[in-house]
Amino acid sequence: MVCGIDEAGRGPLAGPLVVAGAILKEPISGLDDSKRLSPKVRHALYERILERAHYHIVTIESSTIDNQGLSASIAHALRQIAARLEADRFIFDGNSSFGVEGIEPIVKADSTIPEVMAASILAKVTRDRIMCQLDRLYPQYGFCRHKGYGTKEHIEAIKRYGLSPIHRKCFRPKALEPNLLDLMEGDP
């Protein structure tokens, strides 16, 4: 039995990291890397995965990433998934197990292993939904459009409004370097 694991939100400037693990109870047609699927198809597959898989989803808030670091946050999520789901193999999409014993990293696993594809979809849809909810709290940033990634629109919003409570203060994009400390002091 294989548990596929993938994450969404490793690189954004704002919002949580979401790591999902999935064990398929039966095959699901149409699975693929979440980034290669349209939002409509992703959402339909998400519902099918919830019905046809054992899964566990871990959300790590931006403040935890700031305090513990990204690698430690990913390792924590991997340990949680391995503790909650029973499988013979735990395959994580990527090139590192982040020091977690029993995790087998495979590059591009989200393109080749159905369980990892399912985890990819669970993580992406969960995170996208969270970012759209956060967009209602902080509409000036446009989180529902760019999901917290460092787009031009997002960088301009940070310059104008400063950092919100959900921004990762440990991430320092070059576009903000000259005035990042001022932005951090002016947290809304």
Image: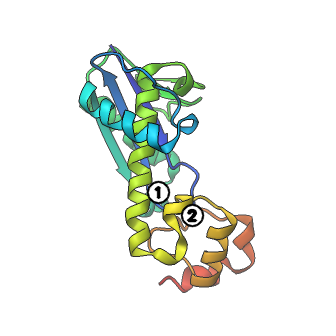
User: Against 184, is 104 above or below?
Assistant: above
Disc 1 designates what residue?
Answer: 65
Disc 2 to disc 1: CB gap under 8 Å? yes
Residue at x 28%, y 34% (from the top left corner): 50
> What type is the residue that disc 2 sits on?
Cys
Q: In the rendered view, does 151 fall on the left or right side of 131?
A: right
Residue at x 44%, y 73% (from the top left corner): 165
Q: Is residue 61 visible?
A: no
Disc 2 designates what residue?
Answer: 170
Percent position (x, y) of residue 14? 51, 63
> What type is the residue that disc 1 sits on?
Ile
Residue at x 52%, y 40% (from the top left corner): 38
Instruction: Report which quarter residue 13 is drawn in.
Output: bottom right
What distance separates the C-alpha of mark 2 from that of mark 1? 8 Å
Residue 29 versus residue 146: which sits nearer the camera? 29
Badge 2 density bin: few <14, some 14–19, many ≥20, Cα 10 Å? some
User: Against 156, is 50 above or below?
Assistant: above
Q: Is residue 77 visible?
A: yes
Percent position (x, y) of residue 149? 59, 58
Percent position (x, y) of residue 125? 41, 45
Instruction: Report which quarter residue 136 is drawn in.
Output: bottom left
